[in-house]
Protein backbone atom coordinates (compact mmCIF):
# COMPACT_ATOMS: atom_id res chain seq x y z
CA UNK A 1 0.00 0.00 0.00
CA UNK A 2 1.25 3.47 -0.94
CA UNK A 3 0.14 6.85 0.46
CA UNK A 4 1.22 9.78 -1.75
CA UNK A 5 1.10 12.68 0.71
CA UNK A 6 1.48 15.50 -1.83
CA UNK A 7 0.09 15.63 -5.37
CA UNK A 8 -1.80 18.21 -7.43
CA UNK A 9 -4.19 16.05 -9.43
CA UNK A 10 -6.67 18.91 -9.75
CA UNK A 11 -4.38 20.69 -12.26
CA UNK A 12 -5.54 20.89 -15.87
CA UNK A 13 -2.69 18.71 -17.17
CA UNK A 14 -4.59 15.73 -15.72
CA UNK A 15 -7.99 16.63 -17.20
CA UNK A 16 -7.80 14.35 -20.22
CA UNK A 17 -7.03 11.09 -18.42
CA UNK A 18 -7.61 11.66 -14.69
CA UNK A 19 -10.06 8.79 -14.27
CA UNK A 20 -7.82 6.33 -16.12
CA UNK A 21 -4.81 7.46 -14.12
CA UNK A 22 -6.56 6.98 -10.78
CA UNK A 23 -7.59 3.48 -11.82
CA UNK A 24 -3.98 2.65 -12.74
CA UNK A 25 -2.81 4.09 -9.43
CA UNK A 26 -5.25 1.93 -7.50
CA UNK A 27 -4.11 -1.16 -9.41
CA UNK A 28 -0.50 -0.24 -8.54
CA UNK A 29 -1.29 -0.08 -4.82
CA UNK A 30 -1.66 3.70 -4.38
CA UNK A 31 -4.42 3.54 -1.78
CA UNK A 32 -4.49 7.17 -0.64
CA UNK A 33 -3.40 10.57 -1.96
CA UNK A 34 -3.34 13.92 -0.16
CA UNK A 35 -3.92 16.87 -2.50
CA UNK A 36 -3.11 20.36 -1.17
CA UNK A 37 -4.21 23.67 -2.63
CA UNK A 38 -2.02 26.48 -3.90
CA UNK A 39 -4.08 29.62 -4.50
CA UNK A 40 -7.18 30.83 -2.68
CA UNK A 41 -9.54 30.18 -5.60
CA UNK A 42 -8.01 26.78 -6.23
CA UNK A 43 -9.28 25.42 -2.92
CA UNK A 44 -12.91 25.16 -4.05
CA UNK A 45 -11.98 23.96 -7.56
CA UNK A 46 -9.76 21.26 -6.06
CA UNK A 47 -12.52 20.00 -3.78
CA UNK A 48 -15.01 19.92 -6.66
CA UNK A 49 -12.68 18.36 -9.25
CA UNK A 50 -11.40 15.55 -7.03
CA UNK A 51 -14.59 14.82 -5.07
CA UNK A 52 -15.39 11.70 -7.17
CA UNK A 53 -12.10 10.03 -6.23
CA UNK A 54 -12.58 8.43 -2.86
CA UNK A 55 -8.90 7.75 -2.23
CA UNK A 56 -8.17 11.50 -2.21
CA UNK A 57 -7.87 13.55 0.98
CA UNK A 58 -7.43 17.32 0.91
CA UNK A 59 -5.43 20.14 2.45
CA UNK A 60 -6.80 23.67 2.07
CA UNK A 61 -4.60 26.73 2.22
CA UNK A 62 -2.63 29.34 0.30
CA UNK A 63 0.89 28.77 -1.01
CA UNK A 64 3.38 31.42 0.16
CA UNK A 65 4.20 32.49 -3.41
CA UNK A 66 0.52 33.40 -3.91
CA UNK A 67 0.24 35.57 -0.82
CA UNK A 68 1.06 38.89 -2.56
CA UNK A 69 -2.05 38.44 -4.72
CA UNK A 70 -4.67 38.77 -1.99
CA UNK A 71 -5.78 41.12 0.76
CA UNK A 72 -6.91 39.57 4.02
CA UNK A 73 -7.91 42.83 5.69
CA UNK A 74 -11.69 42.28 5.54
CA UNK A 75 -11.56 38.80 7.05
CA UNK A 76 -13.42 37.25 4.12
CA UNK A 77 -10.64 34.87 3.15
CA UNK A 78 -10.10 33.80 6.73
CA UNK A 79 -13.76 32.84 6.99
CA UNK A 80 -13.76 31.05 3.65
CA UNK A 81 -10.70 28.97 4.51
CA UNK A 82 -12.24 28.01 7.84
CA UNK A 83 -15.45 26.97 6.06
CA UNK A 84 -13.58 24.88 3.51
CA UNK A 85 -11.36 23.31 6.19
CA UNK A 86 -14.50 21.90 7.84
CA UNK A 87 -15.51 20.04 4.66
CA UNK A 88 -15.42 16.22 4.57
CA UNK A 89 -12.05 14.64 3.70
CA UNK A 90 -10.11 17.84 4.51
CA UNK A 91 -7.25 16.42 6.56
CA UNK A 92 -4.78 19.31 6.84
CA UNK A 93 -4.04 23.00 6.25
CA UNK A 94 -1.65 23.71 3.41
CA UNK A 95 0.33 24.21 1.65
CA UNK A 96 1.49 27.11 3.81
CA UNK A 97 4.87 28.43 4.81
CA UNK A 98 7.74 30.53 3.49
CA UNK A 99 9.30 30.59 0.01
CA UNK A 100 12.48 32.63 -0.41
CA UNK A 101 13.63 30.90 -3.58
CA UNK A 102 12.96 34.03 -5.66
CA UNK A 103 15.57 35.98 -3.71
CA UNK A 104 13.18 37.64 -1.26
CA UNK A 105 16.04 38.60 1.04
CA UNK A 106 16.01 41.96 -0.79
CA UNK A 107 12.22 42.38 -0.56
CA UNK A 108 11.28 42.72 3.11
CA UNK A 109 7.72 43.73 2.24
CA UNK A 110 7.09 40.40 0.51
CA UNK A 111 8.72 38.49 3.35
CA UNK A 112 6.41 40.31 5.77
CA UNK A 113 3.38 39.32 3.68
CA UNK A 114 4.44 35.66 3.61
CA UNK A 115 4.98 35.67 7.37
CA UNK A 116 1.58 37.28 7.95
CA UNK A 117 -0.26 34.68 5.88
CA UNK A 118 1.75 31.90 7.48
CA UNK A 119 0.59 33.05 10.90
CA UNK A 120 -3.06 33.42 9.87
CA UNK A 121 -3.17 29.90 8.49
CA UNK A 122 -1.46 28.57 11.60
CA UNK A 123 -4.28 30.14 13.60
CA UNK A 124 -6.84 28.22 11.52
CA UNK A 125 -4.93 24.97 11.92
CA UNK A 126 -4.68 25.53 15.65
CA UNK A 127 -8.37 26.32 16.08
CA UNK A 128 -9.45 23.29 14.02
CA UNK A 129 -6.69 21.02 15.38
CA UNK A 130 -5.48 20.08 11.91
CA UNK A 131 -1.94 19.12 10.89
CA UNK A 132 0.17 21.24 8.54
CA UNK A 133 1.48 20.72 5.02
CA UNK A 134 4.48 23.03 5.14
CA UNK A 135 6.12 24.54 2.07
CA UNK A 136 9.54 25.86 3.09
CA UNK A 137 12.02 26.81 0.39
CA UNK A 138 15.21 28.80 0.78
CA UNK A 139 17.24 30.63 -1.84
CA UNK A 140 20.49 29.06 -3.10
CA UNK A 141 22.40 31.98 -1.60
CA UNK A 142 20.93 31.39 1.88
CA UNK A 143 20.02 27.69 1.99
CA UNK A 144 18.89 27.62 5.62
CA UNK A 145 17.18 30.97 6.11
CA UNK A 146 13.59 29.99 5.22
CA UNK A 147 13.82 26.93 7.47
CA UNK A 148 15.22 29.04 10.29
CA UNK A 149 12.50 31.69 9.94
CA UNK A 150 9.71 29.11 9.70
CA UNK A 151 10.96 27.30 12.79
CA UNK A 152 11.11 30.60 14.67
CA UNK A 153 7.45 31.28 13.82
CA UNK A 154 6.35 27.75 14.72
CA UNK A 155 8.16 27.80 18.05
CA UNK A 156 6.46 31.08 18.96
CA UNK A 157 2.99 29.50 18.76
CA UNK A 158 1.06 28.73 21.94
CA UNK A 159 0.79 25.05 20.96
CA UNK A 160 3.07 22.62 19.17
CA UNK A 161 1.93 21.49 15.72
CA UNK A 162 2.09 18.23 13.84
CA UNK A 163 2.59 18.08 10.10
CA UNK A 164 4.88 17.36 7.19
CA UNK A 165 7.68 19.41 5.66
CA UNK A 166 6.72 18.96 2.02
CA UNK A 167 9.56 18.35 -0.45
CA UNK A 168 12.11 18.43 2.33
CA UNK A 169 15.39 19.68 0.91
CA UNK A 170 17.65 20.47 3.85
CA UNK A 171 20.05 18.48 5.99
CA UNK A 172 19.77 16.18 8.99
CA UNK A 173 20.70 18.89 11.49
CA UNK A 174 17.83 21.11 10.31
CA UNK A 175 15.42 18.16 10.49
CA UNK A 176 16.46 17.56 14.10
CA UNK A 177 15.67 21.17 15.00
CA UNK A 178 12.13 20.72 13.71
CA UNK A 179 11.73 17.47 15.62
CA UNK A 180 12.70 19.32 18.79
CA UNK A 181 9.93 21.87 18.21
CA UNK A 182 6.99 19.73 17.10
CA UNK A 183 5.63 16.46 15.78
CA UNK A 184 6.90 16.69 12.20
CA UNK A 185 7.48 14.30 9.31
CA UNK A 186 9.51 14.87 6.16
CA UNK A 187 8.04 14.51 2.66
CA UNK A 188 10.46 12.70 0.36
CA UNK A 189 9.99 12.43 -3.40
CA UNK A 190 11.84 12.60 -6.69
CA UNK A 191 14.44 15.11 -5.44
CA UNK A 192 16.03 12.30 -3.44
CA UNK A 193 17.25 10.78 -6.72
CA UNK A 194 18.82 13.96 -8.15
CA UNK A 195 22.49 14.81 -8.42
CA UNK A 196 23.78 17.19 -5.78
CA UNK A 197 21.35 15.90 -3.12
CA UNK A 198 23.85 14.04 -0.95
CA UNK A 199 22.81 16.11 2.07
CA UNK A 200 19.20 14.93 1.64
CA UNK A 201 20.20 11.29 1.17
CA UNK A 202 22.30 11.53 4.35
CA UNK A 203 19.30 12.99 6.21
CA UNK A 204 17.02 10.20 5.01
CA UNK A 205 19.59 7.61 6.04
CA UNK A 206 19.76 9.03 9.58
CA UNK A 207 16.10 9.90 10.20
CA UNK A 208 13.84 7.23 11.71
CA UNK A 209 11.75 5.64 8.97
CA UNK A 210 8.66 6.59 11.01
CA UNK A 211 9.48 10.25 10.30
CA UNK A 212 9.48 9.86 6.50
CA UNK A 213 6.50 10.24 4.16
CA UNK A 214 6.29 9.52 0.45
CA UNK A 215 5.24 12.24 -1.98
CA UNK A 216 5.41 13.13 -5.66
CA UNK A 217 4.39 16.80 -5.92
CA UNK A 218 2.75 15.58 -9.14
CA UNK A 219 2.95 16.70 -11.89
CA UNK A 220 6.33 18.15 -10.81
CA UNK A 221 9.71 16.67 -9.79
CA UNK A 222 9.73 13.18 -11.37
CA UNK A 223 12.44 10.82 -10.08
CA UNK A 224 15.61 10.50 -12.10
CA UNK A 225 15.09 8.00 -14.90
CA UNK A 226 11.30 8.42 -15.03
CA UNK A 227 9.51 10.26 -17.86
CA UNK A 228 10.03 14.00 -17.38
CA UNK A 229 6.81 15.15 -19.02
CA UNK A 230 4.56 14.61 -16.01
CA UNK A 231 5.17 13.06 -12.62
CA UNK A 232 2.50 10.79 -11.06
CA UNK A 233 2.18 8.48 -8.09
CA UNK A 234 3.06 5.61 -10.43
CA UNK A 235 6.70 6.78 -10.19
CA UNK A 236 6.91 6.36 -6.41
CA UNK A 237 8.49 2.87 -6.55
CA UNK A 238 11.75 4.54 -7.69
CA UNK A 239 11.73 6.68 -4.54
CA UNK A 240 10.72 3.74 -2.35
CA UNK A 241 13.61 1.67 -3.69
CA UNK A 242 16.19 4.36 -2.93
CA UNK A 243 14.81 4.94 0.58
CA UNK A 244 14.99 1.17 1.17
CA UNK A 245 18.63 1.14 0.10
CA UNK A 246 19.46 4.08 2.36
CA UNK A 247 17.63 2.53 5.32
CA UNK A 248 18.92 -1.02 4.68
CA UNK A 249 15.41 -2.46 4.66
CA UNK A 250 12.97 -3.87 2.11
CA UNK A 251 10.80 -1.72 -0.17
CA UNK A 252 7.78 -3.42 1.44
CA UNK A 253 8.89 -2.11 4.84
CA UNK A 254 9.17 1.42 3.43
CA UNK A 255 5.69 1.19 1.91
CA UNK A 256 4.06 -0.17 5.05
CA UNK A 257 5.78 2.17 7.50
CA UNK A 258 5.23 5.34 5.47
CA UNK A 259 1.59 4.36 4.87
CA UNK A 260 0.96 3.85 8.58
CA UNK A 261 2.74 7.11 9.44
CA UNK A 262 0.65 9.08 6.92
CA UNK A 263 -2.59 7.52 8.14
CA UNK A 264 -1.71 8.34 11.73
CA UNK A 265 -0.92 11.95 10.84
CA UNK A 266 -3.84 12.75 8.55
CA UNK A 267 -6.63 10.20 8.97
CA UNK A 268 -6.93 10.30 12.75
CA UNK A 269 -8.04 13.92 12.52
CA UNK A 270 -10.86 12.92 10.18
CA UNK A 271 -11.93 10.22 12.63
CA UNK A 272 -11.86 12.62 15.55
CA UNK A 273 -14.04 15.15 13.67
CA UNK A 274 -16.60 12.60 12.39
Image (cartoon, helix red, strand yellow):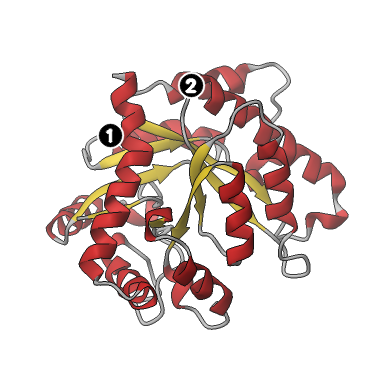
> Which residue is at 68% across, 32% downward?
119
Task: Name the image quarter holding residue 67.
Answer: top right
Q: Nearer the viewer, residue 101 or 158?
A: 158
- At which x and y percent is residue 64? 64, 44
- How crowded pointer 1 is (Cα within 10 Å; few <14, some 14-19, many 20+) is rated as some
Vertical relation: 98 (above or below) 266 = below
Question: In the picture, residue 76 is in which quadrant?
Answer: top right
**In the displayed structure, does residue 194 sit left or right of residue 119?**
left
Residue 49 at x, y percent in the picture: 32, 38
Residue 186: in sight, yes or no?
Answer: yes
Seen from the viewer's position, the closer of residues 70 and 195 is: 195
Q: Identify the residue at horizontal 58%, vertical 81% (top origin).
A: 196
Q: Nearer the viewer, residue 268 or 167?
A: 268
Q: Residue at x 45, y 25 (%)?
A: 85
Q: Position of residue 132 (x, y in %)?
A: 51, 39
Residue 155 falls left or right of residue 8: right
Local secondary structure at mark 1: loop
Q: Which mark is residue 128?
A: 2
In front of the other: label 1 or label 2?
Answer: 2
> Label 2 neighbourhood size at 10 Å, few (<14), some (14-19), many (20+)?
some
Q: Earlier in the sequence, mark 1 or mark 2?
A: 1
Q: Write the residue at 28% across / 48% down.
A: 260
Quarter of the image for the C terminus: give it.
Answer: top left
Question: Which residue ends up furthest to the left in the rendered image?
Answer: 27
Nearer the observer, 71 or 28: 28
- The secondary element bearing badge 2 is classed as helix
- Per the image, the residue denoted by label 1 is 51
Quadrant in the picture for the N terminus: bottom left
Is 44 left or right of 41, judged from the image as shown?
Answer: left
Amino acid sequence: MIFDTHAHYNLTCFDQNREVLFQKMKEAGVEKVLCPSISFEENQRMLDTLAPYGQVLFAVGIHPTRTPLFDWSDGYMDGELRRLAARPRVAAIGELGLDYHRGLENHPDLIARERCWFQRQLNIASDLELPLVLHIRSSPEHPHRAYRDALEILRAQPRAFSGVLHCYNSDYETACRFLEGGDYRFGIGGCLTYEGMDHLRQAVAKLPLERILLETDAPFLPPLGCPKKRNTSLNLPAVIQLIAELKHCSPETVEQTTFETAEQLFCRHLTERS
